[in-house]
Each structure stands twice: as C-alpha cells, then as structure tokens.
C-alpha cells in the first residue's frame, strides 16, 4: 500500500486559536481572506454548542517556511508551519469571534463579527441594535474570552446587570450560570485535522481539496500563481490586492484605480500582466514558467525562475500603471460603453486591456490610433461573445497569431483582420437580428445597441437629452435616469393574449425613455401615447428619433410579431452604424 499523503491530528479549538494567533497556522494564498456572513458564523457556534460535528480541517505543511497569509489584521510572531486548505472560513470566523479581532471582508475592508447568546433558552443570534439593548442577551460573546479572564467574572457581571431589570431566582441563576459556563467551554471543542505533507505540490493539494470538498471553491491556476507570488514576490501580490481594493472605493481626487466599469479581482489583473509579459492565456503554462520550468526539457532551475519573475514584475508594473489603466478605460468610452451595467463580459474587458497594453508598450502605437483600434476590438468581442465558452483557448489562439506581428502595421492589421472576419455581412444581416430575438436582460446585443446610440449621439426616446448623458454611471438617484420602456405595454399585449415574459420582454419591444415618461405612458397602447409624444418634435427631429430608436413605418398599427421582426433588423443596422463610426 502506498504511503498516505497526510496524517491525522487532533486539536482543541483553544489550541487552534492559539496557533493562529501566534502565526503558526497561516492562511494560504490559494484561499482568499474572506469570512462568511454573520448568520453562518452564528450557525457554526450553535452547532458546536450543541456538540454537533462541524467537519474536518485540511492543513498543508509549509515546507518553504514563508509565503502564507495570516488570519486577522495584526502581525504574528511566527512564520506559519501549517497552511489552511479546507476550513478557512470556519477558522477565520472562529478566530475573529473568540479573539474579538477584525478580519478582511470581500471588499478588503476590516470588520468585526458580533454574535449574541441568550442563556435562558440557549439561543444564538447575530447582534443588532435591539439585542444589544436587551439584558437577556450576551450581546457579543467575544467578551466572554476577552483578556483570558475566567467565566466566573463574566457570569457575575451578567447576573448583576440582569437583576437591575428583573428578579432572578436562585434556580434560574444556576441555570444561566451553567449555560454561560458551557459556552465558555466551547474553546475545548475537539477538531480533527488532516495535515498534508510538505512534499506534495500545489496540483496535488488542489486535487485533494476538490475530492474531499465538492461544495467548496474550486482551486484554479490563478490561485497557484498568486501562491507563488506570495512565496517569491509577496510585494507583487500585495500590489495586485491594493490595486483591486482602490478600484472599489472612490477617492477625493487622488489618482487611483477606481472606475465605473469593473471591480477587478487580483487574478483578473494578473491575467493582463501575464498576457503582456508572456503572451499566454493558459495560466497552467504560466505557472510552470514561473516555477522555472523549461518548456522543452521539462527541467526546473532557480535561475530560470528568477528570470521569469523579472519578466512578470515588469509586465505587472505596466499593467498597474494608473495612466495606462485610465487610458484604457477611455477606449471603452470611445466604444460607447458608459459603465459597468453595460459590461456583459469581464473576460472581454481584461483581454482587451491586455491587447491595449501590448499595443502601447511593444508596438508604440499612437494613442488616438490605439484607442480606436481597441474600442473596435472590445465592441466586437463584447457583441459577439468572443470569449464565451473557452476564453483561455480563444485568447491563446489570438496570442499565437500575434507572434507573427513584428511591427506596428502588422499588429494593427492582424486585429482589424480578425474583426473583419468576425463581423461579416452575414453576421450583420442574419446572425445579429437573430441574436436580438431574446428577452435576456443582459444580452450583449442589447448593450451594443445602447453603446451605438451613444456613438451616434442619439437622444433618449421622446426627449432632447442624450442617451450618453443619462447612461452616465456617476448619475445616481433612487430611480434610474432612463428606463427600458415597453413600446407595446404588457397589459396591452395581455389583451391580445400575449402574456409570456419571453414574448412581452423581447429586446425589440424595449426603448430607452426618461423615467418620468415611462411612468406617464404606463399601460397606454401605442396608438394612444405615441401621437401625444410626437407633438414635442418637429419633422426633422421626429425623423432622427424614429431612426435612432428603430421604429418601423406605421409601427403603432403593426402586428406585434411583425413589429419585432422589423425592429430587430433596424436595431442591427444601428449597431452596425455605431460600430462603423469607430474610425479605422
């Protein structure tokens, strides 16, 4: 029988907390430092209090002696000996509550978890304002273990505070004291941990993780590259996280990565960096390269690893450069995409950024030419779902083609050739109208239509305000400045026995109107509301409005199905005109 890859070790909760607090048990970078929501933490304490099992822990012996992320936000005294592979959410949550310390949330901010306990009926709750005022509760059980004091001191204070509000009999005092003692002793709750040998590599750790934890987050190659960065270039990992944190938080005018398009994760920005540095999309290859592997001989060397990390450092520095980042964001504005609600593929966003970086750094393309080129590329890839399905394979194929580009002209020519081969006459005249035959609220074709209205400087339907102005994401009100109005209202269609959402909510039945107009139109039929609203415009204005918003002649009297078919063709034409307005 082959030797096992692990050993079984028993721990008490107090021992685990002590080792985490000292830094002997660390959080590995193949798991992100985020905690459960408070209700899950409450349920965990309830299960442990009742003596229920709460699952195995899986640790990985840290043979390198560094490269691990610590739980909480304070500095630890030791280099982690064990990394948490499975059980990170449980241990992070338990540590935060037992020690009363903050942890990092999914937006990279610090937060405390407050769990309350009512000794009278042994009930756990997430503390809120009412519970904190209720003397029947321990409002934050963290206080029970604070400063290493005994339960006797806390019980005495709890009973004293309770007596200020009501009488407490000797029998009840005994019951409440017993319940609090029992909660205090939860620190002796037994855990079983499986400790994986330091001799196994990240791929085997991932395989073990997946096999024993089918409900967990599947580990991927980006996780392992981030792990390598923590071991060999921790500053680089920190730079990625800092960039992503700043992208979520508006500043008071200071330069930052904040934007209205995307809240990037470290692995996404990493993709742009490795795409620029190594012309690779399959991170499996990049992981091997960064470990110092010769892709021809399969041999590893420290010298090669150092060289490849130098390549990554330079590429990542360029990808994180705020001027480059915001210059790229301007290409999205140039493409007509005004904010994150219009982005249906973050993969297309990241890969477009990668090509932007390559064009700027490697081929020194003039900014105004590069902006229009990448705007066209993003419009095309977003509209067609170019990176849907197998994005790494598709982008890897694009990189293979790019290897033949030796100068500015060949790079520009290659991208334009791919665009032209994708957006053919058949695509515009047949494929796109068919793709518009959907009720999907996140259709790439619909947002390409909105982007085209921005590019064509179109007004909102029945308004003299611009679509681009009212789609500005910086305009935040309780109601959206624009709303999708049913040209044929649902209640009107109901009278025609058309009730299925897939029919009533067709993209071709929507038009952008101001919120107030949408309210006023309500359920009026087109023959009722349209003549009233067109009185706002002269003939020339009305012609432009019907062109932009793809209203067929005599549409208000059309059969609904015929109207949808005709409008899809007109919408496809507007999308084409918008795209063609991007200079080549």
Image (spheres, rainbow, N blue to C red):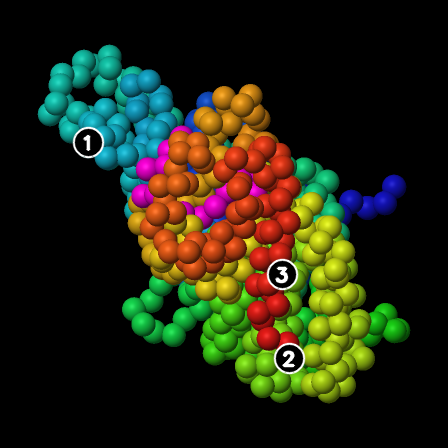
- Is residue 514 inside the magenta stretch? yes
- Give how far apart the Cα atoms at labels 2 and 1 are: 61 Å
* Relative to 167, 577 lies left or right: right
Disc 3 crowd rating (10 Å Cα; few below 14, some 14-19, many 20+) is: some
As drawn, the residue found furthest toward the front would be 539
Q: Residue at x 51, y 27 (%)?
A: 493
Disc 3 secondary structure class: helix
**Residue 2: in magenta span:** no
Give the side of residue 483 with respect to residue 504, left or right.
left
Mark 2 or mark 1, earlier in chain: 1
Residue at the disc numbered 3: 576
Quarter of image, res 414: bottom right
Q: Secondary structure at mark 2?
A: helix
Distance (Cα) linking label 3 and label 1: 62 Å
Residue beneath disc 2: 359
Q: Residue at x 63, y 53 (%)?
A: 572
Q: Which residue is mark 1?
A: 133
Region rendered in magenta: 506-523
Q: Work out which quarter of the rendered image holds the N terminus and state it.
A: top right
Secondary structure under the numbered disc 1 in the rendered image? helix
Determine the image quadrant of residue 270.
bottom right
Q: Residue at x 62, y 87 (%)?
A: 364
Residues at marks 3 and 1 touching, judged by CB atoms closer than 8 Å = no
Lower position in the chain sequence, tag 3 or tag 1: 1
């Amino acid at each position: 029988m082959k030797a096992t890859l692990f050993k079984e070790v028993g721990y008490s909760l107090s021992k685990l907390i002590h080792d985490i607090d000292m830094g002997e048990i660390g959080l590995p970078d193949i798991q992100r430092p985020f905690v459960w929501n408070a209700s899950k933490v409450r349920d965990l304490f309830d299960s442990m209090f009742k003596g229920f099992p709460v699952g195995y822990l899986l640790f990985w012996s840290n043979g390198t002696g560094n490269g691990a992320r610590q739980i909480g936000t304070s500095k630890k005294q030791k280099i982690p000996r064990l990394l948490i592979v499975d059980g990170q959410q449980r241990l992070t949550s338990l540590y935060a509550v037992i020690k009363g310390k903050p942890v990092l949330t999914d937006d990279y901010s610090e937060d405390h978890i407050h769990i309350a306990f009512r000794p009278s009926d042994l009930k756990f709750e997430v503390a809120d304002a009412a519970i904190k005022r209720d003397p029947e509760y321990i409002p934050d059980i963290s206080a029970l273990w604070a400063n290493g004091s005994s339960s006797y001191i806390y019980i005495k204070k709890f009973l004293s505070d309770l007596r200020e509000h009501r009488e407490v009999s000797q029998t009840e005092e005994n019951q409440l004291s017993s319940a609090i003692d029992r909660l205090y002793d939860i620190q002796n709750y037994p855990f079983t941990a499986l400790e994986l040998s330091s001799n196994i590599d990240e791929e085997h750790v991932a395989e073990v993780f997946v096999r024993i934890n089918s409900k967990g987050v599947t580990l991927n190659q980006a996780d392992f590259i981030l792990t390598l960065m923590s071991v060999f270039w921790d500053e680089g990992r920190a730079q990625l996280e800092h960039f992503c944190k700043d992208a979520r938080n508006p500043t008071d005018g200071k330069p930052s990565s904040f934007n209205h398009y995307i809240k990037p994760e470290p692995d996404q920005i990493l993709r742009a960096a490795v795409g620029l540095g190594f012309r690779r999309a399959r991170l499996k290859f990049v992981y091997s390269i960064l470990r110092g592997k010769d892709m021809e001989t399969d041999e590893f060397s420290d010298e090669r690893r150092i060289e490849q990390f130098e390549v990554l450092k330079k590429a990542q520095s360029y990808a994180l450069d705020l001027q480059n980042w915001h210059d790229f964001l301007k290409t999205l504005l140039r493409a007509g995409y005004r904010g994150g609600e219009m982005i249906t593929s973050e993969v297309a966003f990241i890969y477009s950024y990668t090509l932007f970086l390559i064009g700027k750094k490697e081929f020194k393309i003039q900014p105004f030419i590069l902006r229009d080129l990448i705007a066209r590329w993003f419009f095309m890839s977003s509209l067609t779902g170019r990176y849907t399905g197998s994005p790494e394979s598709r982008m890897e194929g694009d990189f293979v083609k790019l290897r033949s580009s030796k100068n500015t002209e060949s790079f520009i020519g290659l991208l334009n050739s791919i665009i032209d081969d994708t957006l053919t006459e058949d695509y515009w005249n047949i494929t796109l109208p068919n793709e518009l035959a959907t009720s999907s609220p996140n259709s790439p074709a619909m947002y390409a239509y909105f982007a085209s209205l921005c590019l064509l400087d179109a007004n909102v339907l029945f308004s003299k305000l611009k679509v681009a102005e009212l789609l500005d994401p910086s305009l935040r009100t309780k109601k959206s400045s624009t709303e999708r109005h049913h040209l044929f209202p649902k209640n009107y269609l109901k009278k025609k026995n058309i009730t299925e959402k897939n029919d009533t909510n067709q993209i071709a039945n929507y038009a952008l109107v101001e919120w107030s107009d949408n309210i006023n139109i309500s359920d009026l039929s087109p023959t009722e509301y349209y003549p009233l609203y067109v009185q706002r415009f002269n003939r020339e204005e009305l012609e432009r409005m019907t062109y932009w918003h793809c209203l067929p002649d005599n549409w208000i009297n059309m059969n609904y199905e015929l109207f949808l078919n005709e409008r899809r063709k007109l919408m496809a034409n507007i999308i084409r005109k918008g795209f063609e307005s991007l200079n080549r």
